[in-house]
Image: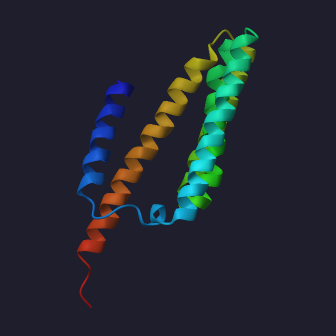
Amino acid sequence: MGTGLGVLLTVAGVVVTKRSAGRLRVMADPVVRRRYSIIVGLEFGLLGAGAAVLGATGQYRWIAVWICFGVGVHFFPLATTLANRSLRLLGVLLVVVAAAALTAGLASATAPSTVTGAGAGLCLLAFGLATLLIGGRARAAANNPVPR
């Protein structure tokens, strides 16, 4: 169900993006693009290295927690870089999901990946839907200004 909703949201996002005029203003700045690339590159490198270490040491069950935590943390510098404060909330939510998954994995027989998959998936889906709806309203307001 979650995958199906995610696919539908992705399609809707692509359609809205293609229909919107121009590219993201913030990404037109080469300094911002460079910072974005550095943040994402560091994220991929650190998360990949951490996952490799966890896997190589037989601690593979914690890889999902590590990835969820790292993705959550990477939203903090992205919020500043992309001038989008709402990304901080998403970062907090994902870090909380990672902490819940770690706790559940240590205190019960529940697989940490179960908690991270459901929790992170719901957070990302909700955030994507909210962004799509709010972004759509903002574009509509910009295209149809209220007469004075």
Name the residue: 29% across, 35% down: 8
Instruction: Mark yes or no: residue 83 visible.
Output: no
The residue at the point 37 percent across, 58 percent down is 134
Q: Quadrant of residue 42?
A: top right
55 lies above or below 50: above
Q: Nearer the viewer, residue 20 or 113?
A: 20
| Residue 38 on image: x %, y % | 62, 49
Task: Locate residue 36, reporting x and y percent.
Answer: 57, 53
Residue at point 28% right, 39% down? Answer: 11
Residue 36 against residue 110 in the figure, above or below: below
Side of 25 where 10 appears, left or right = left
How far across and down, in percent of the image, does residue 3 sit? 37, 26
Quadrant of the snapshot with the C terminus: bottom left
Residue drawn at (66%, 38%), measured in percent from left and top? 95
Q: Quick one: 75 or 137, which is closer to the camera?
A: 75
Residue 26 picture location, percent across and down: 48, 65
